[in-house]
Image: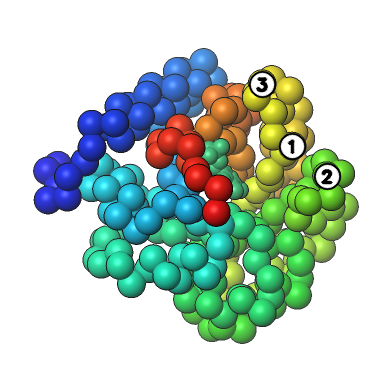
């Protein structure tokens, strides 16, 4: 496919490298490319970076902040088939705006937030963010609350549950993170939920081996983010 927007050589190289890593991890675990969605995480980068990635063939994007994405959104133009996932924490007072801007909210962690999103009145895909570590800074629901939240989401006619999501404590070594990925897979299986959003630039191969259906990749595609 030949887009009209210039795709830099560097981006092509990075995307190829990520796809190679994905293929190898899939081969090791006997899974196929369609089993995993690559979410390009574009927080902090301008709208032009999203358009470039789209022209290179990517269709699923992750953003962390409602307000930041609200600013970029008008600059994106028509991107048929593109889908945007909110992967950052969502305060319920921003739920209406989030439901308008995103197709999937991956960070639902309370029945109250689910109800707020449902009240917006448009169909919306959601995932449940599960907290698997005791890091203070992390959001997400305790595993003991998953069953109740699934029930609450089922009562919301506009919401479709697409799986569980987690953000383990960051570690350079993906093997250290593996038990968190395995835990999320076990929880999904116990609750008969299918999608698993887990794995970032440094550890997505391990996440794929543990069953990830969505990997969230920023740095490996776009380089390091400047501090804002
Ligand atoms: C920023 C972010 C990512 C991407 O992290 P990289 O290490 O840059 O790939 C993935 N998931 C979440 C929730 C993030 O906030």
Give the mark nearest the N terminus, 2 or 1: 2
Q: Position of residue 121 (x, y in %)?
A: 54, 83
Which residue lies most toward the front here? 227
Q: Residue 113: which quarter of the image?
A: bottom right
The residue carrying mark 1 is 169
> Residue at the location (30% across, 67% down)?
75
Left or right placement of residue 73 versus residue 68 in this view: left
Q: Do the residues labelled 3 and 2 touch (CB within 8 Å)?
A: no
Query: How far apart are the two marked residues, 1 and 3, measured between alpha carbons?
Result: 11 Å
Q: Where is residue 115 in the image (x, y as percent from the top left)?
A: 69, 77
The residue carrying mark 3 is 173
Ligand 1 is found in the corner quadrant, namely top right
The residue carrying mark 2 is 135
Mark 1 CB in 8 Å range of ligand 1? no
Instruction: Give the secondary structure at mark 2.
Output: loop
Q: Residue 160: which quarter of the image?
A: bottom right
Left or right placement of residue 190 versus residue 159 in this view: right
> Residue at the location (84% across, 50% down)?
136
Q: In this view, does 98 lie above or below 79?
A: below
Query: How far apart are the two marked residues, 3 and 2, measured between alpha carbons?
Result: 18 Å
Q: Position of residue 218 (x, y in %)?
A: 48, 41
Q: Residue 173: which quarter of the image?
A: top right
Q: Are marks 2 and 1 in contact (CB under 8 Å)?
A: yes
Left or right placement of residue 55 versus residue 210 in this view: left
User: Callout 1: 10 Å neighbours few (<14), some, many (20+)?
Assistant: some
The quadrant of the rendering that contains the C terminus is bottom right
The quadrant of the rendering that contains the N terminus is top left
> Residue at the location (39% across, 65% down)?
72
């Amino acid at each position: 496919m030949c887009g009209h927007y210039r795709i830099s050589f560097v981006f092509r190289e990075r995307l190829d490298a990520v796809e190679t890593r994905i293929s190898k991890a899939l081969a090791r675990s006997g899974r196929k490319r369609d089993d995993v969605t690559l979410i390009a995480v574009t927080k902090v980068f301008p709208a032009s970076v999203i358009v470039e990635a789209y022209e290179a063939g990517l269709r699923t994007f992750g953003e962390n902040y409602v307000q930041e994405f609200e600013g970029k959104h008008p600059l994106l133009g028509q991107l048929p088939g593109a889908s945007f996932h909110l992967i950052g924490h969502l305060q319920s007072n921003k739920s209406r705006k989030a439901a308008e801007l995103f197709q999937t909210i991956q960070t639902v962690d309370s029945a109250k937030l689910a109800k707020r999103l449902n009240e917006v009145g448009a169909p919306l895909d959601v995932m449940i963010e599960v907290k698997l570590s005791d890091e203070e800074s992390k959001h997400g629901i305790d595993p003991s609350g998953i069953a109740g939240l699934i029930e609450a989401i089922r009562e919301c006619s506009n919401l479709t549950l697409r799986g569980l999501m987690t953000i383990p404590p960051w570690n350079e070594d993906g093997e250290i993170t593996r038990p968190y990925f395995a835990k999320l897979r076990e929880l999904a299986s116990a609750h008969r939920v299918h999608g698993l959003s887990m794995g970032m630039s440094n550890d997505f191969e391990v996440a794929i081996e543990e069953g990830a259906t969505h990997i969230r990749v920023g740095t490996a595609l776009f380089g390091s983010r400047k501090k804002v």
